[in-house]
Amino acid sequence: MNATEMFESIYGKKPLYTAFTPYRICPLGAHSDHQLGKITGFAINKGIHMAYGPKENGVIELQSAQFDKRAQWHVEATPKTKENDWADHLRGATIALHKRYPLRRGLCAVVDGELPIGGLSSSAAVIITYLSALCTMNEISLSPKELITISKEAENKYVGVSCGKLDQSCEVYCKKDHLLYMDMLDDSYELIPQNPNMKPYKIAIFFSGVARTLAGSAFNMRVDECRSAAYALKAYGGMDYGKFEETNLRDVPVEVYEEYKDRLPENWRKRAEHWYSEFDRVQRGAEAWRRGDIEEFGRLSFESGRSSIYTWETGSPELKTLYEIMTQTEGIYGGRFSGAGFKGCCMALIDPAFEESIKKKVESEYLKAFPDLKGKYSAHICESADGVRLN
């Protein structure tokens, strides 16, 4: 039952509106955006659907196809602290939007995600879909930058995840058959078209079968380790430094890092090493894509995945196993964890001619290692897509 059918079942009528936001993948630029690095991304042709209608009394009433608990609050009285359920992201979004624009109408809605949760920025996609609906109800037109800022604020300040703008930017700016190449320092971006001489590709998503959460994971700790490294490097290098929470590795030239890296605690040095090496990989990857060299682009994505495991030090046993299987599977150009690497899924760019053999091999090898995940593991073949359509 999809979102529209579920809405009709609950409310006994057709929804007046529907909305959709695609999921995203980031083949290069992992763990980089929160330190104002550069990223690459694609939106994919799977995502979050919402069927909804107005509630003139200002009540927000939400039902998810993936979660049992119905959520309800008023636009003028959104709970100030999170309630630790699936709708916290949307409570945070309501508060962030209401700070900027008056809200009078609420909505009744059903939310449905096309793929399992974890690694494809489902939280950002849900927020963006919800904001587009709430703006429609209240005749608000957001610019792309406003939509990204409000969505990020909901995750940072309400949910408590120290994410950057990668997810939201991909879901808003991406264009089918183009690579999003974006600099988080100034939000400048380029959509690099697929080179006509590039070999064909599709996007494979391999779900580990293990769900994940960011707020309660080591994600925030990794961000703090980066900031700590940047803060220390500024001090060693005689650079000016201000507030800790406003310190980023992008502030520190790589030459300063190379000169003083051996003074850093091991964990801080490793996080910084990943960040600087990933910054370089993104730039080389964008140029490889521009000239149509998908093999080199894929190789760099595999390299990014290895750095995520051994330098950033993330990845569950399941995701590490999936990654290693991918590196040994014919027809996969490259890939890595999708998302922060705390459970969730892996993404890969594949040669469509090997689609069936890839799916068979990855599933066989993975379930040999984790037989208990049979029925929970899944593989999905996707294509690049346009970002969300704004009103």
Image (cartoon, rainbow, N blue to C red):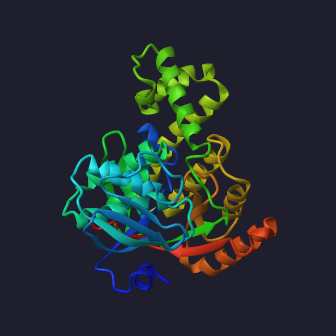
Q: Quadrant of residue 302?
A: bottom right
* Residue 327 seen in the current view: yes
* Residue 198 seen in the current view: no
The C terminus - image quarter: bottom left
Q: Of all residues shown, which one is farthest toward the top? A: 238
| In the displayed structure image, the side of residue 176 where residue 145 appears, left or right | left
The foreground one among 171 and 81 is: 81
Counting every numbered tag in the picture gives 0
The foreground one among 122 and 351 is: 122
Q: Of all residues shown, which one is farthest toward the front? A: 57
| In the displayed structure image, the side of residue 25 where residue 92 appears, left or right | left
Position of residue 318 measured from the top left corner of the image (x, y, whole percent): 71, 59
Position of residue 369 measured from the top left corner of the image (x, y, whole percent): 80, 65
Position of residue 296 measured from the top left corner of the image (x, y, whole percent): 52, 57
The foreground one among 294 and 94 is: 94
Rendered position, 338 above or below 157: below
Q: Which residue is depicted at the point 41% across and 50% down?
A: 79
Q: In which quarter of the image is residue 129?
A: bottom left
Position of residue 126 measured from the top left corner of the image (x, y, whole percent): 42, 63
Rendered position, 375 above or below 134: below
| In the displayed structure image, the side of residue 251 where residue 355 appears, left or right | right
Q: Which residue is depicted at the point 64% across and 24% down?
A: 265
Q: Which residue is depicted at the point 45% across and 81% down?
A: 6
